[in-house]
Amino acid sequence: MTENNSLLKYKRILLKVSGESLAGPLEVGIDPKEANKVADLIKRVRDLGVDVAIVIGGGNLWRGAIGENKGMDRATADYMGMLATVMNALALMDALEKLGVMTRVMTSIEMRTVAEPYIRRRAIRHLEKGRVVIFGGGTGNPYFSTDTAAALRATEIGADVVIKATKVDGIYDSDPKRNPHAIKFEKLSYLDTLARRIEAMDATAVTLCMDNDLPILVLNLWDQESLIKALYGETVGTLVSHEG
């Protein structure tokens, strides 16, 4: 806990991180150096006195949609994706604990030899004790994305915001990599986000956040200061809320 804690806008966050954030240049596999970079940033946030929970994707190892497109049963392909998120969670836990950050991995699919089963009250207690909690295994159900898992877990633990960490600095009206004239939104309402079919977060996740009045902040994880600035209420990225 630091002296600046009282100035924080968000004191408990759910950070949604892609699996690719742990990968190297080819965006596949797990690169410990990349995991260390993410862990460094999370440690900075935790050192501010912020309660940090994390949901991490598995796209660097496996995507259920790819398996389905190649003829696999969708449920089976999705369960494989859930297992991939657990591998990423363990890699990030290892990087965090090497920095001295107490971390717990909790999974929606029980695998007690490597992680705790997800229990809401226990997760909240871990956060209250200053531990970073990483939720692996998605929601535990096929057909739901890790975005939806992030919205669900954030609601359950009473997070102040879901922070979707991406490689771009917010939501645009078109792909900024393809259109140099793309316009960035500083704020959007949930309904506008759904109506525009914006892919920054899937519709199920946005609807769940809307129903529970949980804001979504989309920002660039690799801008080292953007996340810290956001925690203090500075205008960073794109904020999705009822007000828009």
Image (spheres, helix red, strand yellow):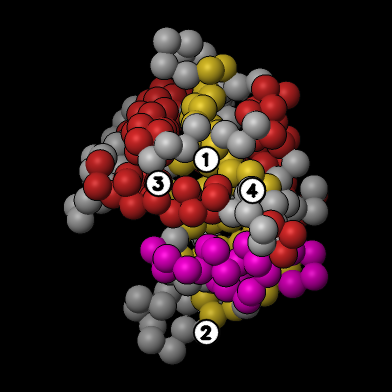
The Cα–Cα distance between marks 1 and 2, rounded to whole angstroms, is: 28 Å
* Residue 103 in the image, given as x and y percentages of width and height: 49, 31
The Cα–Cα distance between marks 3 and 4, rounded to whole angstroms, is: 18 Å
If you read the primary sequence from the N terminus, does the residue marked by circle 3 or circle 4 appear first? Answer: 4
Of the pair 9 and 138, the residue shown nearer to us: 9
Viewed as shown, does residue 17 lie left or right of 150? left
Quickly name the residue at label 3. 39
Instruction: Indicate which disc residue 1 carries.
Output: 4
Closer to us: mark 3 or mark 4? 4
Judging from the image, what secondary structure is the residue with disc 4 in? loop
Closer to us: mark 2 or mark 3? 3
If you read the primary sequence from the N terminus, does the residue marked by circle 1 or circle 2 appear first? Answer: 1
Task: Check whether the beta carbons of the residues at disc 3 and disc 4 lie within 8 A of each other.
Answer: no
In the rendered structure, which segment of residues is drawn in magenta? 222-244
Q: Is residue 165 visible?
A: yes
The Cα–Cα distance between marks 3 and 1, rounded to whole angstroms, is: 14 Å
